[in-house]
Image: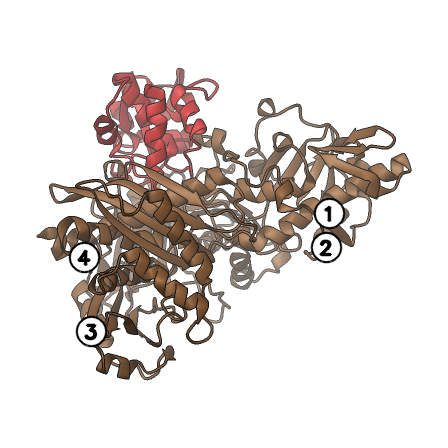
Amino acid sequence: MTLVKTTYNRRSFIKATAISGGGMVLGFSWLASCKPTPEQIKAMPKEWFNINGFLKIGDNGLVTIMSPNPEIGQNVKTSMPMIIAEELDTDWANVIVEQAPLNTDIFKRQLAGGSQSIRQGWESLRMAGATARRMLMEAAAKEWQVPVDELTTEAGMIYHKKSGKSTDYGKVASAAGSLPVPKEVNLKDVKDFKIIGTPRKNVDGPKIVTGQPLFGLDYKRDGMLIAMIVHAPAFGMKLKSVEDTAAKSMPGIKDVFVINTYPEGVEKQWSDTDAFPDLVVVVGNSTWEVMQAKKALKVEWEQAANPDSTADYVAKMAAEGGKKPKEASRRDGDPEAAFKNAAQVIERTYTAPYLAHNTMEPMNFFAHVTPDKAELVGPIQTPEFLEKTLAARLSMPLEKIDIQMTRMGGGFGRRLYGHFGVEAAVISQKLNAPVKLIYTREDDMTQGLYRPAYSVTYRAALDADKNLIGFHIRGGGMQDSPVHPNRFPAGAVDNYLAEEWTVDNSISTGAWRAPGSNFIAGAEQSFLDEVAEAAGKDPIEFRLALFDRAIKNPVGKDNDYDAQRYAGVLKLVKEKSGWGQEQPNVSRGVSAYFCHNSYVAQVVDLVVEDGKPVIQKIHAAVDCGILVNPLAATNLCEGGMVDGIGHALYSAMTFRDGVPEQSNFDKYRLIRHSEAPKAIEVHFVENDIDPTGLGEPLNPPIVAALANALYKATGKRVYDQPFMMDKAMLG
Amino acid sequence: MPIFNLNINGKKQQVDVAPDTPILWVLRDHLDLVGTKYGCGIAQCGACTIHVGDVAMRSCQMPVSQVGNQPITTIEGLSEKGDHPVQRAWLEHDVAQCGYCQAGQIMNAAALLKANPKPSEAEIEGAMNGNICRCATYVRIKAAIKTVAS
C-alpha cells in the first residue's frame, strides 16, 4: 500500500456532512428511477449513510456510488465507480451506481471531453474510496477498542485478526459517517486490485436492452410542452421576417416566437456558439404537431455575405496551403538545406471534408425556468459551463440553477457546445412553463460545429542512402489547424519544419472526436508508409528505427510523446498480427499514433471486392496505462476504429452557397453493418502507469492503416477523404 | 381528432391523435413508451424499429391510421422480464456503448431471428443494414445475433 495525503476536494466532505442524515440526499425523482430495480440486487437497505459526496452505504452493506461525469457511451458510469469501489474494498455486486448531478462543490471536472475522465478522475476517485474505507475501519476500531492499523478489509467486510472480530461496512456506516476525514490514507498497490482490471458489464445494460427511460429525449414532466426551432438554412444568414398565422392556428400549437440565444452583453463560455443567433421557436403539446406547424411557417432570411460552396473553400485551402506562413511552429536543424541537398524529395497533399457529429440522439434539453429557479435536465458534455452561461443569460445566481445529466445518445464532441440547453431555458423562461426542446435530425445535422475541412502537405528528404534527413509539414484548415508540431516524427529527424495556417468562412466548426488528430494521424501515417517504401524499408521497421533515434538521441525539445511506449505498441501489434506472414490475396496496412495521452498501433487486413473494401481483420495494440475495465475498453476501441474507417471511407458534409447539402442519413453516409470489419482483436500493453482514456485515440490512426492496406490492394494511394470518392477508388 | 384503438404489447390502448401521426410519436408522446427512439424520421437509421405482427417496421414512417388491429410490439414488450434471447445475448456481449440505437437493433434482430433462426453472415448484414450505430458496435451486434442463432 502507498500512504498518500488526501488531496482531493475536501469540500466534498463538508457538503456531504452538512446534508447527511440518511435518505436519498442526492436523489432526484426521475433520475432516481434510473437505478437498478431492487430485484436485480439484494434487498434495499432501510437507511443510507453518507460517507462522503461520492458514496453512501446502506445498513445492509449495499453501496451507492455517484458517477460524477457525463456518460456519452464511453462507459464512465461503470468504470469511474469501479475505481471508487476498488479502494473502498467492497464487492462490485454490492454496488448501485447513480448519475451524480452537477455539483462542483463535491465533484471536480464533471466534463466529458478530451478522453480525460479516467485520467483526471483517477486520483480523486481512489481517494473517495480509500478515505471512506479508512473511516469505516476507524469506526470499527473505536467500537472494538483496538488500533485501527490492526484491521484489514475485504469485499465489504472488516476483520480484526487478533480478536477474531468481524463486521460488515453496513453495520459501522452510521458511525463512520460522523467521523472526521482522515488526513492520510493508504492506496492499494496495483497488484492488489480486485475490481480494476477485471471485465465489468455496463451498469445501464439491463435498462438499455429493455428500453427504459435513460436519455434526455426520454425525459418527461407533467405539463411539459414540446418546443422545436427553425434556424437559418445557410450559415451567415440573418432573420428577416416570420409569417406564423397558419402555424399558430394548427392543432396543439401554443405559441410561435423568435429568440436570440446569446444577446449582446451576455458573458459566454468557450462552450457557447452562435452559428445561428436568431431562432424561430414553435411550441405545442406534442412533437408531431410541432413538426407539422414548423412546416407551415413562412420564414424569410437575409442573404449571407459571400457564402461558401464546397469548391470555394477547397480553393481557399489550396491557395493558403501554397503560401509560406510567416512563422514556423517548430524548426529543428536546417530543413531548407536538407531539402536542397536531398537525393530524393517526396511531396504529398492530403485533404478531408467537413464532418457532422450525428449523435444518434439529436440535440434536446428539458428546462423549467421560473422566477425563483432554473431546473434543467438533459444530455450535455459540459454541464459546468452550461450552468455559468445560464446564470448570465437568465440573470440568476448559480445556486438557483440545477442541472441534471442524463445518459447521452452519443457525444463525439457535439454536446460540448450547450447552446441547446440555453435555448431550452430561454424558451421555458418566456413561457414560464416546463419545456423540452427537440431538434429534428435535419435541424441537428445542419446546425454546424462540424469537424473542419483540412489539408496538409508533407515533404520528406532522403539522402543517397535513403536515410530520412528532412521532414516538412505544412497544414491547416477551416478555422483550425490540425498540426501538432511537437508530435512524432518531430524528435526523430535532424532537420524538421512544421508550419500552420487557417482560413475562415461562415461555416461553423467545433471539436469532433479527437480534434485535429482525426485527420492528421491518417495523413502522417499514410505519408510515412510512402516514405518507408521509397526508402526500401518495411513500414514497421522504418518507424521503429525513427523511435530508436528519438529514444537514444532525441532531436530538439518538447517532444510530445514517449518514444518507448510508442515503439511498444508497434512491437506488440507486429507480434500479435503476425506481421510479415501475410495471407495470400489479403492486403495489410499498418499505422501508429499517440494522442489524448494513449498510444495505439493498428494493422488492417482487407480485400477489395467489386471496388469495395472488405475489412477482414483489425489487430490493435493499445497502451493506456492501467486498464480499468477491459470489457468496456475493448468495446470502445472497436467502436473507435470502425468509426474512423466509416468516416474516412464514406462521410462528408458539402455545401452550396453556405447551405449544407446533407441534412439526414439518406444523403449523409455513415458506415453500416455490411461495411464493418469482420473481426477485431484488441491487445493492451500491461503496465502500472496511471490510466489514460480511450474515447478518442483509436479513430485517428486507423485511417492510415486503412489507406495503406488499400494501396497494397489496389496499387494506388488515396489522398482525399472520403476515400470512396477518391479518384484511386473511383478508378 | 379521431380515436384509434391500438393493441400494443398485448394491451389495448386508445389514443386521440391526428391520423397522420407516426406510431413512433404515439408511443413516445402519448403512451409514455419511450424505448422506441427517434433518430431520423425518414426510415434511414432504424432507431425506431418496432414489430407490427412479426415484421420489423420503422415506426417513424407508419401513420397510426394504417395500423388497424395489427398487434404492435415495442422494446418494452419484447419480453416480460427483459430476458428475450436477443436481450440476453446483448447483455452477454455487453454490446451497448451509448445505447441509444440498441432498442431498434434488438427489435430488428429479434424479427430477423424469428423469420430466419439460423441466418448466414450475409443474411445478418443484409437484414441489419438499415440500423445505424453511430458508436459503431457492429462487431458486437453481429456476435450477439450469432450467439442467439447457435
Callouts 3 and 1 on one subunit: yes
Q: Amino acid at mark 1?
A: Thr
Helix, strand or loop at label 1? It is: helix
Q: Are marks 4 and 3 on the same chain?
A: yes
Q: Earlier in the sequence, mark 4 or mark 2?
A: 2
Q: Are marks 4 and 3 in contact (CB under 8 Å)?
A: no
Which mark, residue A6?
2
Which of the marked residues, 4 or 1, is nearer the chain's N terminus? 1
Q: Nearer the viewer, mark 4 or mark 1?
A: 4
Instruction: Residue A492 in the image: state x and y as whole percent.
Output: 38, 69
Badge 3 sits on which subunit? A
User: Could you confirm whether marks 4 and 1 are on the same chain?
Assistant: yes
Residue, disc 4? A718
Residues tagged 1 and 2 counted as in contact (Cβ below 8 A)? yes
Residue at the spot of label 3: A345
Label 3, label 2: how far apart the Cα atoms are: 56 Å
User: In this rendering, does residue B146 appear at all?
Assistant: yes
Which residue corresponds to the image point at 8% horizontal and 52% vertical from the top-left? A731
Tell if the residue under mark 3 belongs to the same chain as the one under mark 2.
yes
Q: Residues within 10 Å of mark 3 (few under 14, many from 20)?
A: some
What chain is tagged by disc 1? A
Q: Quadrant of residue A658?
A: bottom left
State if disc 1 and disc 4 touch (CB < 8 Å). no
